[in-house]
Image (cartoon, grey):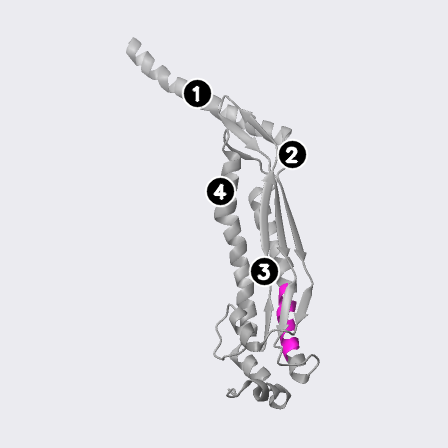
């Protein structure tokens, strides 16, 4: 009879233990939200001016480009690079009973895009007809960057905000910063890189074969006369 009573008491003890652990976790989460500031996402985006250069040959521009062309020369080139940095810091509280800590980070994403360099082949004197045609084309690339780079900052702010804002990070003591750093390197930096590559895909679409042929035959064939023959398409 006493054995049966013991068996009936054990599940009750286990249930009480689980309930106490759950209450402890809930109390710690409540304490996190009460004592810590809200997690925040701050994204800063800066762009340099565009600079026009007319001192590099069309053949040299081809070697500077990351794209593949079906011709020995290119007429112009627009180049930029981005510096992306993600930092975080914030207060932590811990609960020794549950071996848990709570971290409320302020995540700062700095997206810097220094000067955009616009090149027009030096074979075409400034303000010549061909120079102006090539520059007008390259300015389409500048315009696309000016539109898409700020939009990328807004996208990053929104995506990371949905993941982190107003939600303290809870994990084992000594691990929450490590976990956040891992997630930044594994998820967010690749995400930003992928979005930048999407912008480059849009840029590549501006340099279609038809557009390049149009430029090479503009200004009564000035490009053809200067750099060599290119078939019409």
Question: Tag 1, which secondary structure?
Answer: helix
Dot 4: within a 10 Å radius of its alpha carbon, few (fewer than 14), some, or many (20 or more) residues? few
- x and y, in percent, of residue 95 in the image: 53, 24
Query: Residue 213 or 38: which is nearer the viewer?
Result: 213
Dot 1: within a 10 Å radius of its alpha carbon, few (fewer than 14), some, or many (20 or more) residues? few
Of the numbered discs 3 and 1, the one sitting upstream in the chain is 1
Of the numbered discs 1 and 4, the one sitting upstream in the chain is 1
Front position among marks 3 and 4: 3
| In this picture, residue 54 sits left or right of residue 194 | right
Q: Residue at x 33, y 12 (%)?
A: 5
Of the numbered discs 2 and 3, the one sitting upstream in the chain is 2
- The part of the image, by quadrant, that contains residue 35 is top right
Q: Report the disc number at residue 217.
A: none
- x and y, in percent, of residue 160 in the image: 57, 47
Q: Residue at x 52, y 50 (%)?
A: 189
Principal SS element in the magenta part? helix
The relative height of residue 124 versus residue 38 in the rendered view (above or below) is: below
Q: Report the disc number at residue 17.
A: 1
- What range of the chain is rendered magenta? 134-145
Q: What residue sits right under mark 4 in the picture?
A: 182
Q: What residue sits right under mark 2 in the picture?
A: 37
The relative height of residue 68 versus residue 145 in the rendered view (above or below) is: below
Q: What residue sits right under mark 3 in the picture?
A: 81
């Amino acid at each position: 009879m006493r054995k049966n009573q013991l068996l009936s008491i054990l599940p009750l003890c286990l249930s009480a233990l689980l309930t106490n652990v759950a209450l402890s976790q809930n109390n710690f989460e409540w304490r996190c939200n009460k004592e810590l500031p809200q997690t925040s996402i701050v994204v800063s985006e800066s762009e340099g001016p565009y600079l026009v250069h007319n001192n590099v040959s069309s053949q040299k521009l081809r070697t500077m480009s990351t794209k593949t062309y079906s011709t020995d020369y290119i007429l112009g080139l627009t180049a930029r690079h981005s510096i992306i940095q993600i930092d975080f810091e914030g207060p932590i509280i811990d609960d020794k009973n549950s071996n848990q800590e709570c971290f409320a980070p302020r995540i700062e994403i700095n997206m810097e895009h220094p000067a955009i360099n616009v090149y027009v082949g030096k074979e075409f004197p400034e303000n010549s007809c061909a120079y102006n045609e090539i520059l007008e084309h390259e300015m389409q690339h500048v315009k696309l960057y000016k539109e898409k780079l700020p939009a990328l900052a807004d996208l990053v702010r929104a995506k990371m905000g949905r993941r982190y804002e107003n939600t303290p990070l809870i994990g084992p003591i000594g691990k929450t910063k490590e976990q956040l750093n891992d997630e930044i390197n594994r998820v967010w930096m690749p995400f930003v890189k992928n979005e930048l590559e999407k912008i480059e895909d849009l840029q590549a679409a501006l340099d279609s074969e038809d557009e390049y042929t149009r430029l090479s035959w503009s200004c009564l064939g000035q490009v053809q006369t200067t750099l060599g023959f290119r078939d019409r398409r």
